[in-house]
Amino acid sequence: MADVQMTSHLDEVLEACDDALERALVAIGMAAEDYAKRGCPVDTGRLRNSITYAMSKHYGTYSYKDSEGKEYTDTTGQTEKNAVYIGTNVEYAPFQELGTVNGVPAHHFLKNAAANHTQKYKKLIEESMKNA
């Protein structure tokens, strides 16, 4: 009878899957940030330049500069596992996103970036998993 040895590579496979998922989330975050910036109304550039993405795995403090060179800092908190978020900390962003009763039209630049590109995001996930 021949000796048979079996070696488990489960840990390596799981690590490769985690790496692929992280690559996918980064790619989705970058794409969503780009879509949001394209749809964002621009006056000084502060709102557009403040739009960023954050992954649940990486949270903390980040900085950005507006078109006038002013620097701003924001902090992101812990979020759901395996998630990516786009957003801004600019105080008037909700008025631009949702509009106002005083006549500021809703632009939905964040909502549209998240909801209108799901096929692209699915493709990014598939590509990341194939290259695991």
Image (cartoon, helix red, strand yellow):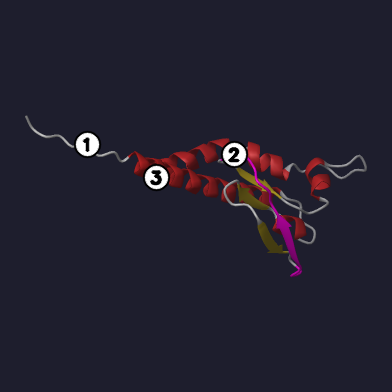
Q: As rendered, which of 35 and 63 lies closer to the eye?
A: 63
Q: In the rendered image, which residue does mark 3 sit on?
A: 16
Q: Position of residue 13 (x, y in %)?
A: 36, 41
| Chief secondary structure of the magenta portion | loop
**How far, Cα to Cα, is label 1 from label 3?**
20 Å
* Numbered tag placed on residue 30 in the rendering: none
Alpha-carbon span between mark 2 and mark 1: 44 Å
Query: Which of the image's four quarters has the C terminus?
Result: top left
Mark 2 or 3, which is nearer the eye?
3
The answer to if 73 sits in the magenta stretch is yes
Foreground mark, 2 or 1, reads: 1
Furthest residue in direction top, as rendered = 1
**Which numbered tag is attached to residue 6?**
1
Q: Give the number of the mark in front: 1 or 3.
A: 1
Q: On the image, numbered disc 2 is attached to which residue? A: 117
Image quadrant occupied by the N terminus: top left
**Callout 2 amino acid:** His
Residues under numbered marks 1 and 3 in contact, where contact means CB atoms less than 8 Å apart = no
Q: How many marks?
A: 3
Give the magenta part as a residue range: 68-81
